[in-house]
Image (cartoon, helix red, strand yellow):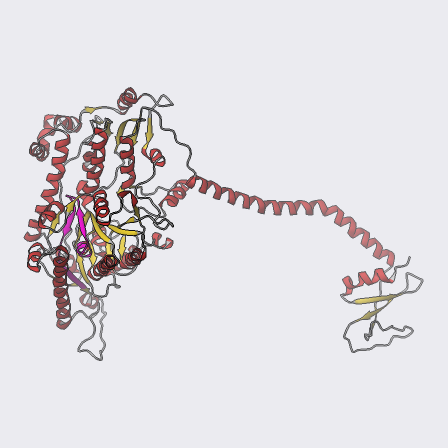
Amino acid sequence: MSVTASRFERLAPRILGVQAIEKYSSSPELVKTICIIRPGSNRHFSFPGFSCPDKRGMVPTVLTAPIRSLTSVHLHSNMKRFLVLLFLPFRLLWCFIRTGTTVLANLVFLGMLVIIFFGIFYTPAITIPEGSALVINPRGNIVEERSVMRPFAQQFNKLAGVPLQEEIFLQDLLDSINAAATDSRIKALVLDLDKLGAASLDQLQVMGEALDQAKKQGKQIIALGDNYNQAQYYLAAHANEIWLNPMGAVDVHGFAVFKLYIKELLEKLAVNVHIFRVGTYKSAIEPLIRNDMSPADREASAMWLGNLWHLYSDSIAWQRKLDGAVLRERIINKNANLDAANGNRAQAAVNMGLVDALKTRPEMMQQLQQLVGPGSDKQTFNSVPFGQYLQTLTPSYSGDSTSGGKAAQIGIISVSGNIIYGKGGVGQIGSDAFLAQLEKISKDERIKAVVVRINTGGGSAFASELIRQGLLQVQLAGKKVVVSMGSMAASGGYWLAANADHIVAAPSTLTGSIGIFGVVPTFENSLARIGVYGDGLSVGSKNLPANLATGMTAEDKTTLQIGVDYGYRRFLEIVAEGRKKSVAEVAVMAEGRVWDGASAQQMGLVDSLGGLKEAVGVASKLANVPPENAVYIRLPPVPFLEQFGPAGANLQKRLAVWLGQIALPGTPLHSELNTRYGFLLDKSDPHHVYAHSLLHEPAALLH
């Protein structure tokens, strides 16, 4: 058997990795001589009895190698081919499995994405049944600043089975109620308020006004619930009928303010808190230097708190056709009413005229079926949830401020939280983001007026002044500025609003608090207890700069007090200029005193009473732009990752060090310090001077 040279040339490179030419004899058993040609080799070997030819001008390297029988080579080739064919099905199966698994995983991933985005963006066709009831069942806190990430977070958390703190956008509720008032398909409104969270009195007032308009349009309003707290009951009072579970209660008990005072704690921890303030009623920092409420703070708080309580109680008394003074007396003597009802709190509510009927849930369902008919499943009543109903509506103030339209617009900016110098974070008013948006508004020729909806107790005096300057630039660009005050716009909140063309506040708004303070905590004594001391030298000044480890010198204290005094005078001048009053007139209203909105209007600190709708109406008249052209303008969003890790984490660490880890997370003390005093530890503020009322959120009064 012979093998051709061409075939060997194809096989040899696989075996030897070189080019080869076979020279062989006629006998297959003899040793074959292989002449191996290595390109570029300079070595030459001679082999007896064999002449190795040159090829393509290359010097060959001669090698003899014993090669087994060609028959054996052929058999090996056949065996290899047989094994390849034998294992081919298994190889194909493995390729199929490997490729199929990858394709399947990709398909599953793409399918999940499609399902998620389908769930977020798909809006099924919604049919509103004739003669149905619109169910107003808000779940969570009422907010006025819509979260950008919230729709995505809700869907992801729903898929993961993780609960998410619910929030209800106030304007969504108002849009639903206002639309239902004139919708012939809607026969009644049902208020299911058991899951309603925090809401401020000004928010409840505007929702109550919308319910009153629906009643005037002939809509029957039924409020039902297992229990009612003060916020829930305020809305329920606007219904034609109020139903209560026989084991339930109406908890209307009045308003109160409560503070934790930590002077003694700081003394035990040897923390030196250096206070610099101006104003008899600037009680914001009293919890740091007292163990109880000062007479001045008690006097000022009693005035605005009493005004808000009368506003609340008179409203529900009028809705329930009761005398306000009589109702307040009944609430004060609630134990006598409870005794008269043999301890039955539900019956006591009926006796006080707060509810109309006691009904179990099945009885409520039966009564609603009689009113609007049974639902499609015959088990419920003919109804539509407000969330579904809302999807059939065009949201108010939803025009796209970035569109290419040329129509004149009124921009609405809604902000809430502490005023922070710099970027700020979630739940804060950062001066950088605010100023960036105001600069865009100044350059946008379509926007003729801006309504700033604010809800803040104040914060950094420097940041407040920067925002005020930004609003002045908007006015210099020929645009009108109207401020709409929410539940609270005090101290720094009033500072930035003072020069607006018009200020609108709700009767229950807490505002004023014209005063500033500075706080510098130092820990030299605390550190000395554990053997830590600070020392150094300074060139160019008499003393070391004030720091946590060495305390403050008398000169440092004088410098900061001078700055606080100047800041207070500047605050008075700004208010006097903006409100067109003398500094002396403003000084009488200042001293850090807090005023309710109605009192502030009487003194000229605000121009008119109302909510966002009224503020938009004022801007419409000032700028000669139709109110329907008003649009919400979002501030630049907080980076995605920072929404999950706001400054509270670092703040908690600082507070833990400050308080020797006495204020443990989850305790009332930790919550109090974190919420009320956390911004004082923000090192980014250039002056450490603050215009803040440090008031509790007014929504807390209703719980």
The answer to which of 570 and 561 lies nearer the viewer is 570
Q: Position of residue 523 (x, y in %)?
A: 20, 65
> Residue at 12% of width from left, 65% of height from top?
565
Q: Is residue 76 above or below residue 36?
A: above
> Residue at 22% of width from left, 29% of height from top?
215
Q: Which of the 4 image quarters holds residue 544?
A: bottom left
Q: Position of residue 356 (x, y in %)?
A: 18, 25
State whether residue 659 appears in this view.
Answer: no
Q: Residue furthest bottom?
A: 539
Quadrant of the image containing the C terminus:
top left
The answer to which of 50 and 436 lies nearer the viewer is 436
State whether residue 369 appears in this view.
Answer: yes
Quadrant of the image containing the N terminus:
bottom right
Q: Residue furthest right?
A: 26
Q: Which of the 4 image quarters holds residue 693?
A: bottom left
Q: Which residues are magenta?
A: 494-520
Q: Position of residue 655 (x, y in %)?
A: 24, 58
Q: Position of residue 619 (x, y in %)?
A: 23, 48
The answer to which of 607 and 135 lies nearer the viewer is 607
Taking the magenta stretch, the answer to whether it contains residue 120 is no
| Left or right relative to 698: residue 103 | right
| Left or right relative to 384: residue 103 | right
| Left or right relative to 273: residue 113 | right
